[in-house]
Amino acid sequence: MEGTDPVKKKLAAALSGGAALVLALTGCSDDSGKKTDDWAKKVCDEVKPQVKKIQGANSSIDQASQQKESSAEVKKTDSAAFQKISDAYKSLASAVDDAGAPPVDNGKKLQKDAVKELKGLSGQYKGLKTTVDKLDTKDQAKFAEGLKGVATKLDTLGKSGDKALNKLQSGELGKSMANQEGCKKPRTSTSS
C-alpha cells in the first residue's frame, strides 16, 4: 500500500485544482436588470445543490486519499465520487439549457457554449469513473500506476476548458449571478 499513498495524495491535489471549475458559475458582484436577474435566479437555484454534490464527492476522494484505505476501498470511493461529479455537471448543463438564452448580447451563444462545456465535463468525469472501475486492485504496482494516470487526467481536466463558463459569468450576467444565493461562492470549512 506504501506505493499508492503518494499517488492518492496527487489525486487529491488534482481534485483541488478541479474544484475551481465548480466555482466557475459564481459571479462577481453588483446589481443588474430584472430580466438578467430572473435568468440568473433560474440557473443559480440549481447551482447550489450541484456544487454541494461536487464538494461532497471531492471530500470523499480526499478522505480516502488521506486515510490508509485498501486499494479496493479507494477504487470504490473514487468511482462513486466521479459518478456524482459527472451527474452534477450534467445537471448544471440542464439548468443552463432549461433557463434559455440569457438576455444579454450573444446570450444564445453563451448559453450554447456553457451547456456544451458542462456536458463535456460530465463526460470526462464519467470517463474517469470508467478508468477507475477498470483498475486492478490485486496488483499494487498496476493500481498505483493506474491511479497516477487518473490523477494526471484529473489535473489536466482541472486546468482546462472553463472559457465558456467564464464568459457566462462575466459582465452584466455575472453581476446578476453573483447576487443570487445559489451562485454565491460557498464558504468552505476545510481547505483543499
Image (cartoon, helix red, strand yellow):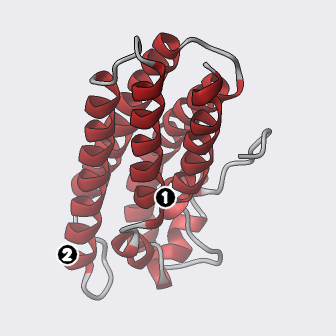
Tell me the amino acid under the disc marked 1. Answer: Leu
Number of the label disc, if any, that sits on residue 80: none
Helix, strand or loop at label 2? It is: helix
**Residue where numbered disc 2 is placed:** 108
Q: Which amino acid does label 2 sit on?
A: Lys
189 left or right of 67 in image: right
Q: Left or right: 4 with respect to 151? A: right
Question: Does any portion of residue 101 appear in the rendered image?
Answer: no
Query: Where does the image place residue 80, in percent across and percent down from the top left?
Result: 41, 22
Q: Nearer the viewer, residue 94 or 87?
A: 87
Quadrant in the picture for residue 52: top right
Q: Which mark is residue 21?
A: 1
Residue 109 at least partly seen: yes
Quadrant where the N terminus is found in the figure: top right
**N-terminal label among 2 and 1:** 1
Q: How far apart are marks 2 and 1 (CA)?
A: 22 Å
